[in-house]
Image (cartoon, rainbow, N blue to C red):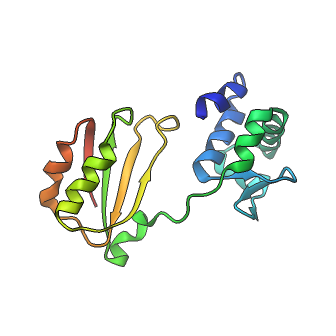
Amino acid sequence: MWHQISSLFAGFPAQKLVAKKMIDLGLGIGADGRIVCDEVEVKEVSLASACGVDRRVVSATVHSILSDRQAARLFSGIRPAGTLLSGIAHELGFGVVELEANAKKPAIIAHATALLAKRRISIRQVYAKDPELYDNPTLVIITERPIPGSLLSHFAKIPAVRKVSIL
């Protein structure tokens, strides 16, 4: 998806930055042409501030998206994924493991979840950063209880995993 979107902004790096931020945050464009997070309107000035650009860049980005049939369809269908619990996992008594891996290799999630299943650790959430948007995409797994440090070496043995953090 990112390849299709980024080509629309060739020569407009600030607009590309805004479009990337919109995708990262799950911000779409409503039927009325406004930036939305689900049904909540996001002001252009707020997005501009988050991206470090002028509000007019955000406006131009929306205009560019709406002028391209495919981009308009994509952005009209984007929805936020929901609350990611990793930042508050410890307060909730949950565990977190982050795996940085080559996302082009198959079965990373399958291997990681199998390790947890063998220890009878239930999974609360799984979140993977899009490898087209991030240079070092990570897989984040939030579990119902803390993950024992003894699993660190097992996660590290998963094919394509470059880095493991148990938080």
The image quadrant that residue 82 belongs to is: bottom right
Question: Is 8 drawn above or below residue 31 in the view shown?
Answer: above
Q: Position of residue 48 (x, y in %)?
A: 72, 48
For the point 84% across and 38% down, the residue is 63
Left or right relative to 137: residue 46: right
Q: Position of residue 153 (x, y in %)?
A: 14, 49
The image quadrant that residue 69 belongs to is: top right
Q: Position of residue 59 (x, y in %)?
A: 82, 43
Q: Position of residue 161 (x, y in %)?
A: 26, 39
- Front residue of 57 and 138: 138
For the point 26% across and 51% down, the residue is 112
For the point 17% across and 61% down, the residue is 118
Left or right relative to 161: residue 16: right
Left or right relative to 45: residue 127: left
- Front residue of 65 and 17: 65
The image quadrant that residue 30 belongs to is: bottom right
Q: Residue furthest right?
A: 32
Left or right relative to 30: residue 128: left
**Quadrant occupied by the N terminus:** top right
Q: Residue furthest bottom?
A: 92
Report if residue 9 is visible in the image: no
Report if residue 73 is visible in the image: yes
**Quadrant occupied by the C terminus:** bottom left
Q: How many marks?
A: 0
For the point 66% across and 47% down, the residue is 22
